[in-house]
Image (cartoon, grey):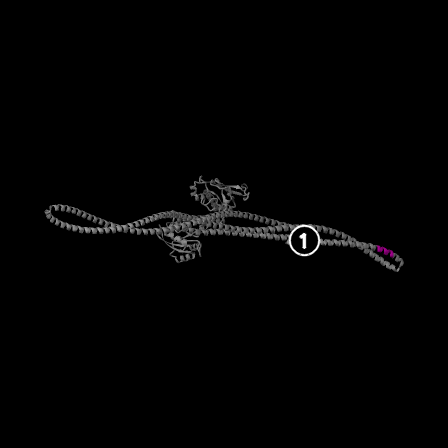
Amino acid sequence: MISENLNLFLADDDKDDCLFFRDALEELPVTTELTTVHNGEQLMQLLKEKIGDLPQVLFLDLNMPRKNGFECLSEIKLDEKLKQMPVIIFSTSFEQDVVNLLYKKGGQYYIRKPAEFSQLKKVIYEALLLIAKGNNSQPSREDFVITGQDPIAT
Amino acid sequence: MAKRKKADELDIANRELAFQNEEKEKRAAELLIANKELVFQNEEKEKRAAELLIANRELVFQDEEKGKRAAELVIANKELIFQDEEKEKRAAELIIANKELLFQDEEKEKRAAELVIANRELVFQDEEKEKRAAELVIANKELVFQDDEKEKRAAELLIANRELVFQNDEKEKRAAELIIANRELAFQNEEKEKRAAELSIANKELAYQNKEKEKRAAELSIANKELAFQNDQKEKRAEELVVANEELAYQNQVKEKRAAELVIANEELAFQNDEKEKRAAELNIANIELAYQSDEKEKRAAELGIANKELAFQNEEKEKRAAELSIANKELAFQNKEKEKRAAELIIANKELAFQNAQKEKRAEELVIANKELAYQNEVKERRAAELIIANEELAFQNHEKEKRAAELNIANIELAYQNDEKEKRAAELSIANKELAYQNTEKEKRAAEKEKRAAELIIANEELAFQNDEKEKRAAELIIANKELMAFTYVSSHDLQEPLRKIQTFADRISAKESQNLTDRGKEYFHRIQESAKRMQTLIEDLLAFSRVNTAERIFVNTDLSPIIDEVKAELKDTIEEKHAVIEALELCPANVIRFQFRQLLYNLIANALKFSDPHIPPRITITSKDVKGSAIGNNKLSSEKEYCHITIEDNGIGFEPEFNDRIFEVFQKLHDKEQYAGTGIGLAIVKKIVENHNGIITATGELGKGAKFDIYIPA
């Protein structure tokens, strides 16, 4: 149970994935307000407009036009006003090197987009539970990847 | 060409020398002749001098004047003698000179002969060199040509392979489509057969119904005829009844009239009776008066009473009968009306039946036509299905042929690769040979100044060869880059393929979860199949990615113990190990110098394979050992005999494989079992081989069907 109303950002150029994400949120026992953007430039502009009213968490896809997820993450982590906002990487690919790099760059968690919808719900719920706990310090490397296997989420 | 020119030049020089020698010989001969002439002239002069001496002496005496002259002549003679002496000296000198010349000529001839030999040698060497150069040129051209050919062939093979892959894909697609089409057709045929069977049944039923109806119609017709006959009869009867009625009515009328007459008669009789009673009374009185007359009259009255009663009874009877007849008439009229109605209904029913019969006959005809059509369609479909089956078989055969072809091409590629290797070796050898030649050339340069140019030419040729070698090395470097690019391409494409695939999976998942109530069982089954196929493709892409990663990833060697790596793999495969009651033994392991994450993958693939291909009747037992061995003890020419190697074995007691597949199983996409039996992509062992090669080692597989498989890995210790 997450009692508070969560304000979420999703940056993903893939409309289908945005749809899946929204559908998953609707079926989860949470109340959320989801804002979606479809490229890195749009994301950075919106974040700068919303300084002072930043979302509790940003779900960030890697492969986006104009400005990709890596660039966005670097920019966010270099910005004093933005760097406190937790960023959860949300990507199709799962390359150990890439995952290591994103952990080094200050990503909060890493989610590999699953193929099954039920699994998608699990990973999003697990991420939201972790965010709702309010501890936004970076976890250890072993806990960086959200698998949906965590007993609290299932 | 330069060499030929040079040879020509040398030839010309030789000829010139020969010519000069000839000239000198001629000159020497001429000089000999001139000497002889001079000798002869000297002799003549001596004779002349002697004659002159005699003449002088004669003249001394003859001419005192001439004494002076004689003295002068003496002087002249002395002079002449001196000159002669000089000439003799000169002649001697000339003789010496001639001898010298002769000697020189001999020397020159020797020299010329030597030169000729040297020239021949040179010519021979030139020829050899030209031959060698020509051979080299040809060999180079051949190499270039072979390289070109191989590149072409490789490109063609690549294209052919791609085409084959594409065609195979297309054919698989086509086959899949055909299978689907066949299934559909089969389904349609089934449906049609069902339909046809149903229609056949329906037709039979209809035919039966028609027969029944015809029977019924015939019966009805008969019934109608009967009815018509009955109607006719009834009409006749009715008419008769009408006539009878009319007669009865008439009889009634007659009877009524009669009755009325009888009533009148009765009234009259009554009146008469009254009159008679009056008269009787009167007669009574008269009887009293007339006693005899009275008796007679009383008898007569009683008789009349009886007659009257009889008449009254007859009247009553007639009235009753008339009433009955009236009722019977009414009934008959009603029955007639009913019968008319019934007849009309029957006529309508008959018309309807006739219409229905006509409809049914039409329908039956249509059905017969439809049946024929269906039968024809069935035939066409059966033919089509038969054709499709043949086409499928052909496709399967072609696929098989193509697979064979692909396998052959693969083998041809391997052979080509081997030949390329050989040629590269050959080129390397040639390069060494060239260097040797260069060395020999320099040696020859020292020995012969004339050969310098030649050597220079050879150097140029060598440089050219060296340049060509460089070009080939560049080309090889380019090929390496091209290969890397291809690897990168494989990686990126596999990576990018994942995204749309995941979408297909998620949407299919969504539909099965959310919309399943709108799907038939078949629809659900199809969705299940989509998900299964997508999952297989995902595995395939992940394996391909792993395969390309093995090629591209960073290689950091560490000297490590294998036990923890095996433990990690065991932990990862825990479920399968428990499910199959497998035992994994790791015995006497020695540390190995490995790229850790790659070696983990290698052990994972081999152990997972051993578990997958286990004998279902006995619990799997996998034995892993490793020990250091000397290269010379292994006896494989790919390994250096001086080096130390770490020999790792992984042995199982599974289903094994036929020994002829010892090498085949390491090739990409090679599978020995169909995917329904043993799931997999055929990449696992290719990855294993690649990893071993990354470790500069070799891997061999030995298998025996039903007795297990053994993998031997040798990597430098």
Where is residue B300 drawn, in percent x and y? Answer: 15, 46
Where is residue B467 drawn, in percent x and y? Answer: 58, 53
Q: Chain of mark 1?
A: B
Magenta includes B250? no
Q: SS class of the residue under badge 1?
A: helix
Magenta includes B50? yes
Magenta stretch, residue numbers: B47-55
Where is residue A35 drawn, in percent x and y? Answer: 38, 55
| Residue, disc 1 | B10
Q: Which one is nearer the viewer's eye here, A136 or B667? A: B667
Q: Residue furthest bottom?
A: B65
Residue B442 appears in the picture as rendered: no
Disc 1 residue crowd, few under 14, some 14–19, many 20+, Cα 10 Å: some
Q: Residue furthest top?
A: B618
Q: Main secondary structure of the magenta part?
A: helix
Q: Residue furthest right?
A: B61
Q: Is residue A67 left or right of residue B348?
A: right
Q: Is residue B709 left or right of residue B299?
A: right
Q: Which one is nearer the viewer's eye here, B456 or B305? A: B305
The quarter of the rendered structure image containing the N terminus of chain B is bottom right
Q: Is residue B244 left or right of residue B657?
A: left
Where is residue B124 drawn, in percent x and y? Answer: 66, 50
Amino acid at pointer 1: Leu
